[in-house]
């Protein structure tokens, strides 16, 4: 049994390499993987050469084929499931799983494939949801005069999600998006909020004098703590960090509101309290 590299076998016999690949997957040829290459048994290739030559020479990724012929992936996958289109499992250049489809098969059954439903019910639902979210995101967008560009809610914006769920009006959600943008983009909030001690009062940290002192005391004692005591310390650290974060947010919300009012994006009566539900 003589093994030949797929590329050499295809070149010497006037075949396309994917014809050999498909023939291996279909069981027409004896093949084996060798590293990142494919070895073909020369005897089985000679015995089935005409059958291999009759296989499709033109292949494309399913996504590209769907775009080329004005199909949806759902239609193409239905055609594959119906046995109308032959396929080869492959990988993209980025190592992701992909599906190659025979273009000859697609063209031979094109009218039949185009008559198939373009989307599944789940795909229709997702498309409707995407369109609704897109329209809302556009509605909450605004032109920031300081950035000189359109600003839309960030991915993960709680104000956007609350508006999408109907818990906030679009007007209220847009106000929160404006304030959150100004707070993050036009103040030093993102750096200042990390200074926990700046936002705590002496009574918050009691005998430790500062949050830093509390952390130092924790690490000095942690090895001698039982699990319950350790959890109590961790809960207190979390509580103080959350308290500091909330105070920082409120402080910078007031600044952000004033800046947005100066720029004409918020009315002068806009309150700063609870001004953002967008993640900080």
Image (tube, grey):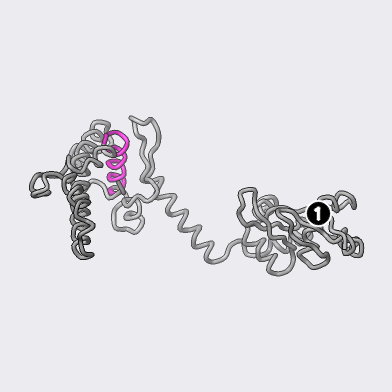
Q: Quadrant of residue 40?
A: bottom right
Judging by the rendered image, the residue that carries numbered circle 1 is 6
How many numbered discs sit on the rendered protein? Answer: 1
Farthest bottom residue?
82
Q: Does 4 appear above or below 174?
A: below
Q: Position of residue 8 (x, y in %)?
A: 84, 50
Q: Main secondary structure of the magenta part?
A: helix
Q: Does 173 appear above or below 99?
A: above
Q: Does 81 appear above or below 246?
A: below
Farthest front residue?
224
Left or right: 58 with respect to 235?
Answer: right
Asked if the magenta segment contains residue 183, the reply would be: yes
Q: Residues within 10 Å of mark 1 (few under 14, many from 20)?
A: many
Instruction: Look at the image and give the residue range highlighted in magenta.
Output: 172-188
Q: Position of residue 229 (x, y in %)?
A: 18, 62
Q: Nearer the viewer, residue 30 or 131?
A: 30
Q: Position of residue 106 (x, y in %)?
A: 75, 58
**Residue at position x 18%, y 61% in the image:** 232
Question: In what element is the residue under mark 1?
Answer: helix
**Residue at position x 36%, y 45% in the image:** 140
Q: Does 46 appear above or below 94?
A: below
């Amino acid at each position: 049994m003589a093994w030949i590299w797929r590329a050499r076998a295809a070149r010497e016999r006037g075949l396309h390499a994917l014809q050999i690949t498909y023939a291996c997957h279909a069981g027409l040829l004896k093949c084996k993987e060798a590293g990142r290459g494919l070895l073909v048994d020369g005897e089985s290739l000679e015995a089935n050469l005409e059958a291999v030559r009759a296989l499709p020479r033109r292949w494309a990724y399913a996504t590209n084929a769907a775009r080329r012929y004005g199909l949806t992936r759902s239609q193409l996958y239905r055609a594959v499931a119906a046995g109308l289109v032959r396929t080869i499992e492959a990988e993209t250049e980025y190592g992701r799983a992909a599906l190659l489809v025979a273009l000859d098969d697609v063209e031979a059954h094109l009218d039949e494939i185009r008559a198939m439903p373009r989307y599944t019910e789940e795909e229709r639902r997702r498309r409707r949801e995407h369109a609704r979210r897109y329209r809302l995101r556009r509605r909450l967008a605004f032109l920031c005069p300081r950035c000189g560009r359109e600003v839309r809610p960030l991915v993960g914006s709680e104000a956007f999600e609350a508006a999408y769920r109907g818990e906030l009006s679009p007007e209220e959600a847009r106000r929160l998006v404006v304030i959150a943008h100004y707070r993050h983009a036009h103040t030093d909030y993102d750096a200042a909020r990390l200074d926990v001690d700046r936002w705590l009062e002496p009574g918050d940290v009691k005998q430790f004098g500062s949050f830093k002192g509390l952390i130092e005391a924790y690490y000095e004692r942690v090895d001698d703590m039982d699990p319950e005591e350790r959890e109590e310390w961790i809960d207190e650290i979390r509580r103080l960090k959350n308290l500091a974060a909330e105070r920082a947010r409120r402080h910078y919300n007031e600044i952000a509101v004033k800046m947005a009012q100066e720029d004409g994006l918020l009315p002068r009566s806009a309150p700063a309290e609870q001004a953002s539900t967008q993640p900080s």
